[in-house]
């Protein structure tokens, strides 16, 4: 599959150790499918939640809303749901990129595909 919008999102400029791709668009929602070298464990889920929490902490401390975020483990991957509703426009890209950068602190990731099952492929 060719990911035409990766450059537009500047994923190649984030310095990630894993591959990151945007597979589709789903309005203001982003679904991150995080694939690992091995089946993700509950410990890996906790590590992922902690990494994203560390990214969010400075914003939460300043009462800046970065979106609704839910992190789950299922079907051989960890899924992160980000809803940017009510996020200030100046923080939208920061939130999208910040999660990807936070995942750089989680070992064993092979790739992260955003909106893989959105149904709005390009």
Image (cartoon, rainbow, N blue to C red):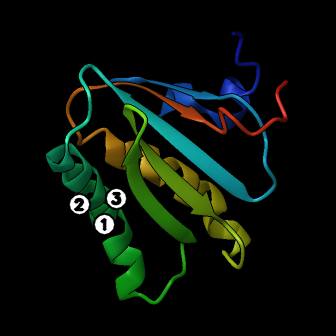
Q: Which residue is mark 3?
A: 52
x and y percentages locating residue 37 in the rendered image: 27, 19
In the visual, does 48 lie left or right of 2?
A: left
Q: Residue at x 66, y 75 (%)?
A: 87
Identity of the residue furthest to the top in this view: 1
What residue is shown with label 2?
50
Q: Residues within 10 Å of mark 1 (few under 14, many from 20)?
A: some
Q: Nearer the viewer, residue 88 or 30?
A: 30
Residue in the picture at 44% in, 51% down: 99
Kindly report the distance in space between the C-alpha atoms of the residues bearing marks 1 and 2.
5 Å
Residue farthest front in this picture: 75
Q: Position of residue 108 (x, y in %)?
A: 23, 27
In this view, 97 is above or below 56: above
Kindly indicate whether the residue at mark 3 contacts the one at mark 1 (C-beta within 8 angstroms). yes
Marks 1/3: CA–CA distance = 4 Å
Residue 36 at x, y percent in the picture? 31, 26
């Amino acid at each position: 599959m060719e990911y035409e919008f990766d450059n537009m999102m500047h994923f190649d400029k984030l310095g990630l150790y894993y591959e990151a791709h945007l597979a589709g668009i789903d309005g203001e929602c982003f679904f991150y499918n995080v694939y690992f070298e091995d089946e993700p464990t509950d410990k890996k889920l906790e590590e992922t939640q902690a990494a994203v929490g560390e990214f969010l902490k400075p914003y939460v401390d300043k009462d800046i809303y970065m979106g609704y975020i839910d992190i789950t483990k299922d079907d051989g991957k960890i899924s992160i749901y980000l809803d940017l509703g009510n996020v200030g426009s100046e923080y939208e890209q920061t939130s999208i990129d910040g999660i990807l950068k936070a995942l750089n602190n989680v070992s064993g990731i092979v790739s992260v595909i955003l909106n893989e099952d959105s149904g709005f492929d390009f």
